[in-house]
Image: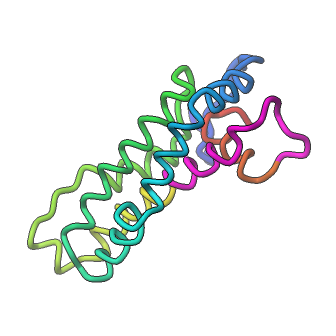
Amino acid sequence: MNEPDGKSQPSPANPDAEALLLANLRQRAAELDGLLESCTDHWGFEDPVYRFYHQSFKVYALQRKTREIVRVLEELAPERPLHRWFLEIVEEGTGSEFEPEHNADWTGVTRPILEAFFHARYFLEMAVRYAYLKAPPNPLPSGYAALLELYGLR
């Protein structure tokens, strides 16, 4: 059962889950970095955001990158479900195909696409930023704590 704050009820935590996440981050650091780079360059970031403001159907292509990021995030801790709010944002921002009628409610239809991408990209950036860690930091930086929240480890 889920709490109102979006967290799952506590379950017996795997004391090694955070260490395994950190190990997976380190192991896949180069891949994560490459994916982040592709989500930060002209075609992966600059152009899709422009396409939203230009009211171009090309903004819909951003959903593909969002799904790719989510797949990689899931692979980093396959035994742990991702935070349900994150999954809700992703669900609302993917799976849409352009229809001419969308132009009448452009922001209502396409803002969820951008929102899902921005959240996914944020967690990818945090994964890259903290992939160098060999042990949990103390005190916790906000971005690292957010990663722990994503995987239900905090």
- Drawn side of residue 57 relative to residue 125, left or right: left
Q: Is residue 123 above or below residue 47?
A: above
Q: Nearer the viewer, residue 92 or 73?
A: 73
* Residue projecting furthest to the right: 138
- Relative image position of residue 19 (x, y in whole percent): 74, 23
Q: Indicate whether residue 131 is drawn in magenta.
A: yes
Q: Position of residue 79 (x, y in %)?
A: 55, 20
Image quadrant holding the N terminus, namely top right
Quadrant of the snapshot with the C terminus: top right
Measuring from the top left, give residue 118's x and y in whole percent.
48, 60
**Left or right: where 139 falls relative to 148:** right
- Which residue is painted at 60% across and 36% down in the image? 29
Magenta segment boundaries in residue numbering = 120-140
Up-down: is 6 above or below 49? above
| Number of numbered discs visible in the structure rendering | 0
Residue plotted at (41% across, 35% down): 71
Q: In the figure, residue 53 lies in which quadrant?
A: bottom left
Question: Looking at the image, is 1 positioned above or below residue 79?
Answer: below
Q: Is residue 126 left or right of residue 115?
A: right
Q: Nearer the viewer, residue 84 or 52?
A: 52
Q: Which residue lies at the image location 49% right of the left edge and 45% below the top edge?
A: 34
